[in-house]
Image (cartoon, rainbow, N blue to C red):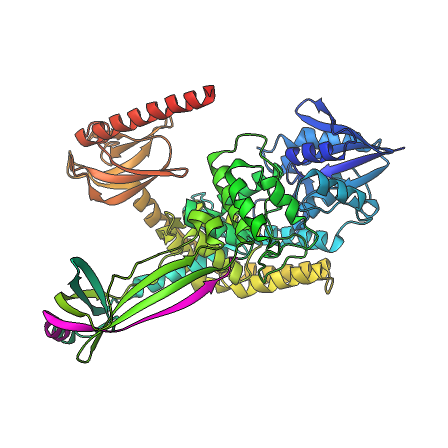
Amino acid sequence: MSRVMVITEKPTAAKRIAHALDENQAPTEVKKRSASYYDCRRGNDDLIVVYALGHLFELKQTEKGWTYPRMETSWVPKYEVEKKATQTKPIINLIKRLSKDVDSFVVATDYDIEGSLIGYLTLKYACKADPKRAQRMFFSSLTDSEIQNAYDNMSNTLDFPMIEAGQVRHEIDWLYGINLTRALTLSVKNTAGWFKIVSTGRVQGPTLSYVAEREQKINLFVPLPFWVIHAKTMHNGVEIELEYSKKRIDTKSDAETIAKTLDRKTAHVDSINSRTTSQQPHPPFNLSTLQSEAYRHFGFKPSRTLAVAQSLYLDALISYPRTSSEKLPQTLDLKEILNRLGKMKSYTSMVKQVVQVGNFTPVQGKKTDPAHPAIHPTGTKPTKRLTPSEKKLFDLIVRRFLALFGEPAVKEHLRADIKHEEHALYLRGLRILKQGWMEFYGSYAKTNERELPEISEGDPLLLHPVNNEEKFTQPPARFNPASLLKLLERENLGTKATRARIVDSIKSRGYTLNDRFELSTLGYALFETLEKYLPDILSPELTRYLEKEMNEIQQETTNREDVLTRAKDELLELLENFKSQEEEIGNDLVTGLQRYWKSKEELGKCPTCRDGTLRVIRSAKTGKRFVGCSNYSEGKCDQTFPLPQKGDLSPLDKTCEHCGYQMFQVTSGRRKWETCINWTECPGRKDELKALEERRTKQTEKTQEDAKT
């Protein structure tokens, strides 16, 4: 009989793994202060299932001083690096104590770079064990059968190439992030005496450059006029809008001539053509396509989608979400998953249709991932009430999975060609002849059906009215979270797990405004400064090269030490260049910060004294913020306005229609709203506040009623 420690990544995963591995599926949870573990029995083994809490160990500099360059690091307990990570201390201590009386170790963390590194570091620094003697479980879902199979067929060695790649990624990201951020921050401090964190990093810099370059294209864009022809006709008492053959007319005179020529003239239906197309189901979800669809349908930011998907995975409802694969393996028991889904009321009828058709070969995509299959439901029924976000994402994943077994959708594209002399107009229609897989995908499938009116070849159509409209060419669209994430994936910057966090950081650092990634004055200042003095920090080529080297470590064509040495040499050269220009860089950043703070804190002229400027002020006594006149401190004006105490404030270029005071936007979490600085006294705002309070009361009552039910 032997004692085996099984190391998992999170408490929920530990509970599921312990339940699956215990021969009676009734493990004992042993609580030790603010940490716990599970005792279970499997055959001749006594299992101790422990959990990390994500990363229990982080990198910390070994050289003293908050300066740069700092190149030497060591792995230390997370609570030594992050003050808020106090919950990791009892977990590390518990694992240390339990590991002293253990015969062997099994790593059962997520099978990816991060999970592999977490298991390795826990073994090496908490258990003080030799990682080369540990075993590894591989699984892509937390269902009982897959966990049991992973334990019975575990590998006798850890995935060391993946671990080495994970180590060097953390080390290089730490080196670039810490040193470049300190360099920028200290340049501001040494110039103006302000301590304002100005951050950048190995991937954050290129991401900022993409946003800035798009903003420059928008700002430099010169709209060009063009004209479009609008033509209508009546047929059998129905008004029909026609499409002119030329989408754009380049001159106003030509547009006026065409409109004048066609108005009140009779055209004839020259021909009616149709073509039929079939559309296969979309491939299974990988993380990128799931994030894109969740943003399109629910407005979820990529980081939110990943967090919700991770929660569904830990509840064993879906497979591991951090995957780039669009393929489902042949070893997956698809019939069993369908059978389980069929027992869920929402999907019973759809599963019956799949079974009746008898096609159990799903559509596959092109992308693969050596670690995990495409995202799919496991068929496990939820044992708890899902949150609204979890319910939405779970439904999307299940319907995408069911659609894989559907028949192709058949569409009929119709076009009527309508002519008057040399002028051609069109009337288009679209019919879904066969729903196929779209029936399973439901509201997530685009149909855009449009019936063609009952017309026949030769029918006369009186064109009226016919007019022209002036339009202008549009600049390229700003990024949204999903499109920026796709760009990073296409450019091979970051990883599946880190891209969403990088996208969020661009906004959280104040470099962009709102969800459309409009560059802020601070973002402009940082981009222009780096572009002028240190363009390599913004270059995706350097980051792409490092990503390539880290992938080669995983493929065992290079080693961690060589990659790390080259990265340090390149960074030292970059920092030396920075040091020689620190004063100029600091001056430019200070100017940008002044513009940024002015745009964030100034809310227009004071309506009372007409001389001062309204600013956001924070009380030295209470710490609360309010709007006050710039003449307030000098005793010349006592005008103040209260402010909401939570959320980011952004001045708007408009005044309140009710009271004429300056408007601003409040963004708190996922909620945002507009109000005026006079919001507590404004007559229009009082009505809005009353209506809001009524809605909140009704929602509270409904929630309480649901809880009773």
Instruction: Write the start and end of the magenta stretch as one range.
Output: 257-282
* The magenta stretch spans residue 278: yes
**Residue 461: percent from left, percent from top:** 16, 68
Considering every residue shown, the one lying at the far top of the view is 708
Answer above or below: position of 495 versus 318.
below
**Residue 428: percent from left, percent from top:** 29, 65
Considering every residue shown, the one lying at the far bottom of the view is 422
Residue at 30% across / 46% down in the picture?
A: 599
Answer above or below: position of 91 versus 585.
above
Q: Is residue 503 visible?
A: no
Answer above or below: position of 630 versus 622.
below
Front residue of 490 and 264: 264
Answer above or below: position of 558 versus 374.
below
Q: Is residue 5 left or right of residue 690?
A: right
Residue at 41% across / 62% down in the picture?
A: 411
Quarter of the picture containing the N terminus is top right
The quarter holding residue 569 reads bottom right
Considering every residue shown, the one lying at the far right of the view is 1
Q: In this view, does 202 lie to the left or right of 702?
A: right
**Residue 432: percent from left, percent from top:** 39, 58
Front residue of 424 and 685: 424
Q: Is residue 72 left or right of residue 589?
A: right
Q: Is residue 639 left or right of residue 478?
A: left
**Residue 367: percent from left, percent from top:** 59, 61
* The magenta stretch spans residue 90: no
